[in-house]
């Protein structure tokens, strides 16, 4: 599946049931773009989580990675999505993801991200 924003390759994640209200369109599978980090629904027939993930060095497979990916989709507005972002990041951390390290790597490794990750990362430290 290509990213609807930039056309880049995407990685699919199965969203944990507890976090589906925060996923785009409350979907159970999301697609994370490997270029701009845009998150979109991936409810296409037969879609499943990717076994091989080109972002695996930063965002792991599994529930923790899915939670972090959902949080990335909410970063457009910290004011409107604060509780969802915190819940997703806490879920990711409880699933074994080093959230601060992952956000740092994303901020420095993805210059075409749809949000200013460096700025968001520093803002997140105030409440996470």
Image (cartoon, rainbow, N blue to C red):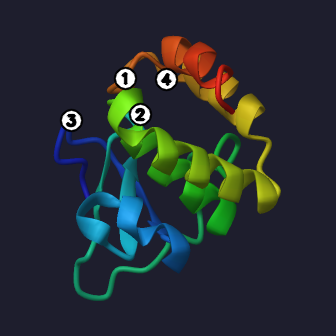
Position of 29 with respect to 7 (left or right) is right
Q: How many marks?
A: 4
Which numbered disc flags the more N-terminal residue, 1 or 4? Answer: 4
Q: Image quarter for residue 104?
A: top right
Marks 1/3: CA–CA distance: 14 Å
Q: Residue 116, relative to residue 56: is it above or below? A: above
C-alpha span from label 1 to label 4: 10 Å
Give the label, 2 or 3, closer to the camera. 2
Residue drawn at x 70%, y 43% as measured from the top left: 57
Left or right position of 97 against 107? right
* Image depth: mark 2 or mark 4 in front: 2
Q: Residue at x 44, y 16 (%)?
A: 111
Foreground mark, 1 or 4? 1
In three-dimensional space, the C-alpha distance between marks 2 and 4, rounded to whole angstroms, equals 15 Å
At label 3, counting other C-alpha atoms closer than 10 Å, the crowd grade (few under 14, some 14-19, many 20 or more) is: some
The residue where tag 2 is placed is 75
In the image, what residue occupies the spot 72% across and 39% down? 99
Q: Earlier in the sequence, mark 2 or mark 1?
A: 2
Quarter of the picture holding the C terminus? top right
Q: Secondary structure at mark 2?
A: loop
Measured from the top left, where is residue 11 in percent x and y?
A: 44, 57
112 relative to 92 in the view: left or right: left
What's the mark number on residue 115? 1
Q: Which residue is mark 4?
A: 110
- Return the residue nearer the eye: 74 or 3: 74
């Amino acid at each position: 599946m290509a990213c609807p924003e930039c056309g880049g390759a995407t990685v699919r994640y199965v969203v944990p049931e507890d976090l589906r209200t925060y996923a785009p369109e409350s979907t159970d599978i999301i697609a994370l773009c490997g270029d701009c980090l845009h998150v979109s629904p991936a409810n296409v027939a037969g879609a499943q989580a990717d076994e091989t993930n080109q972002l695996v060095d930063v965002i792991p497979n599994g529930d923790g990675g899915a939670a972090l990916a959902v949080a990335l989709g909410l970063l457009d507005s910290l004011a409107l999505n604060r509780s969802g972002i915190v819940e997703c990041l806490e879920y990711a951390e409880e699933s074994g993801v080093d959230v601060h390290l992952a956000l740092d790597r994303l901020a420095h490794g993805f210059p075409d991200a749809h949000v200013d990750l460096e700025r968001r990362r520093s803002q997140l430290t105030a409440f996470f």
